[in-house]
Amino acid sequence: MIGLLLPSAAAVVLVCVLRRAYPAFGRIQFHWWGLAAVAFAIELVLYNPPVDSLPLAIALGPWLWVATRFALLASILRNAHPRAAGFVPCLLVALGIGLNTVVVVANGGYMPQSQQAASAVWGVAPASAEPPQTRLENTRPMDSQSRLTWLGDVVPEPTWLPRPNVLSIGDVVLAVGMAGWIFAQLWSVGTAGKCCQAGATGNVEFDEDVFDMGLDRLDGNHQRFRNRSI
């Protein structure tokens, strides 16, 4: 998880360095953010105690997880407007989610995970202390029955990262796209803020010019009135 967030954190730092100012997070607009929040909340509850051990969660959980992936994909595509900032990165985020969803659906609601990559991260292949049927998991070890294995969890994170994990190609694409989208959004709102400030300054200067012209005209009228013979 930490590895997926590092590119986004680097994007924020880069904007701070280039802008020499704190990013305006409050100006970022994300349509259908409520749908994305609900999808994440369902996933958080579904794969954690006590819900993950419920028979109903074990039976329906994988496909409910797939439904949350589609909901998240819909919220991302809603923000992929050609004229919006970060259009291409937004498409990359959607592509990453889409790749993960495809492989999960192809494997019955589970993400196949390379045991070799898992061994590189944790030292041994992940083996649950409980039987798989008693606890809901979103991954399964790869075997001869696994499909689209090249889209599964095959990329081990460096072991020096806190809580390293095994990523999929879709995860990597998603992380890169998210970093690009955050950078584009923060950069665009910074530019918009500067344009607004420049416009306000220009209006003040324009008003001052009009005021000066008005004074000159008033003074000219006063001079003409004073020199006029009565």
Image (tube, rainbow, N blue to C red):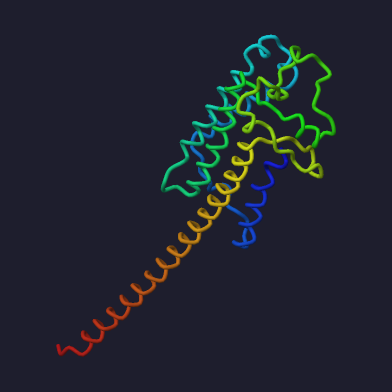
Q: Position of residue 6 (x, y in %)?
A: 69, 46
Q: Looking at the image, which residue sits at the far front?
A: 144
Q: Is residue 159 left or right of residue 25?
A: right
Count of numbered circles in the view: 0
In front here: 117 or 139? Answer: 117
Q: Position of residue 151 (x, y in %)?
A: 62, 32
Which residue corresponds to the image point at 84% horizontal and 19% vertical from the top-left?
A: 129
Q: Is residue 144 left or right of residue 118?
A: left
Q: Is residue 198 above or below residue 38?
A: below
Which quarter of the figure is the N terminus placed in? top right
Q: Position of residue 100 (x, y in %)?
A: 59, 31
Which residue corresponds to the image point at 45% horizontal and 67% vertical from the top-left?
A: 201
Q: Is residue 214 above or below residue 77?
A: below
Which residue corresponds to the image point at 63% horizontal and 27% vertical from the top-left?
A: 41
Q: Looking at the image, which residue sits at the far top?
A: 55
In front here: 74 or 106? Answer: 106
Q: Is residue 24 above or below residue 209?
A: above
Q: Position of residue 15 (x, y in %)?
A: 61, 57
Q: Quadrant of residue 117?
A: top right
Q: Quadrant of residue 172?
A: top right
Q: Is residue 194 left or right of residue 146?
A: left
Q: Quadrant of residue 132?
A: top right
Q: Looking at the image, which residue sits at the far left?
A: 230
Q: Is residue 121 above or below residue 83?
A: above
In front here: 184 or 19? Answer: 184
Which residue corresponds to the image point at 74% horizontal and 38% vertical from the top-left?
A: 156
Which quarter of the figure is the C terminus placed in? bottom left
